[in-house]
Image (tube, helix red, strand yellow):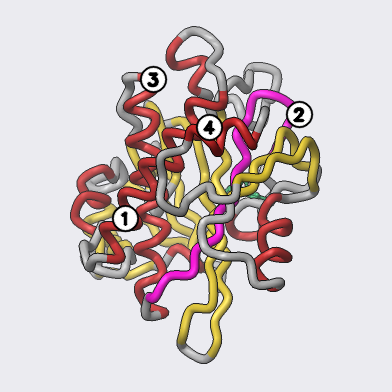
Amino acid sequence: MDAVALEATLKTEMLGHPLRHLSSVPSTQDVVREAARAGAREGLAVVADQQTAGRGRGGRNWWSPPTGGLYLSVLFRPHLAAQHTTWLTMCVALGTAQAIENVCKVRPGLKWPNDLEWQGRKIAGILSDASFRGDRVEYIIVGLGLNVNIDFCAQPDLTNHATSLQSIVGHPLPLEPLLLAVLTQVEDRYLALKQGVSPVSVWAERLTTLGKPVLATTGDGRLLQGIASHVLEDGALCIRLEDGREEIVRAVDVTLRPNRQ
Ligand code: BTN
């Protein structure tokens, strides 16, 4: 990947400026965090061919083989109240979904909170690492792992849960057009957010989780079984339990899976 040539074709105002490409890193999140601490400006994007210690939500690993995945982290310095930082992650999910739609002509759904999915299988995950100064956001690093040309058939523990764009469209896809489309579409959403446009209603419309039976494991180990009924303005999910009570869960402290019983 020629990052200099790619950046030159990017029509964005700030996202992807600068664009750095690395062949192998432990995690692109860590590269961007170091740059953020050193004062890097908003818009810095780091993409890697491979991650040796890719991180997922909830302390999980993100399997990042040497070819076929898009591993991207972007630095934001938004003027957002702490309770609205979830809106930024929604913008990244929506922008990525739109980019996939433009490039691949398929419409991915969102599994709450921000996984991109296709027919129940995950095609991308998003990880947000925020740094606060008091109740002010200092920076947020949003990482995207997109399964582009990864073959999950030989991965018994992942094959039922994950798929890639290559499997969906039936042929391999070049990473560069997807990367450009993601940066462009995410920036559109982010600029709208900066103008005060909330992404919540569009995000909620794309959620495939609503109305479905779910099992949620909370941070304190409780198992909640019920129907994902609706979402709140900050992205929290309301689950209507079998006894009629309602529980509100937030992405930071819950693992959600469909209940196929
Ligand atoms: C998830 O658990 O669904 C989130 C996965 C996020 C993976 C991406 S890949 C690029 C960036 N670097 C990381 O180590 N993680 C994120």
Tell which of 180 and 243 is nearer to you: 180
Cα gap from disc 1 to disc 4, whole angstroms: 21 Å
Span shown in magenta: 63-79
Q: Nearer the viewer, mark 4 or mark 2?
A: 2
**N-term-proximal mark, 1 vs 4:** 4
Disc 1, SS: strand
Disc 2, SS: loop
Left or right: residue 12 versus residue 219 is left
**N-term-proximal mark, 3 vs 2:** 2
**Label 4: few (<14), some (14–19) or many (≥20) C-alpha neighbours in 10 Å:** some
Q: Amino acid at mark 2?
A: Pro
Left or right: residue 95 versus residue 6 is left
Residue that numbered label 2 is attached to: 66
The reply to whether callout 4 and callout 3 are in contact (CB within 8 Å) is: no
Cα gap from disc 4 to disc 3, whole angstroms: 20 Å
| The image quarter in which residue 169 lies | top left
Cα gap from disc 1 to disc 2, whole angstroms: 39 Å
Q: Amino acid at mark 3?
A: Cys
Residue that numbered label 4 is attached to: 161
Query: Magenta stretch: residue 206 in it?
Result: no
Q: In x, y percent, where is residue 253?
A: 51, 68
Q: Nearer the viewer, mark 1 or mark 3?
A: 3
Residue at x-position 50% and y-position 63%:
76
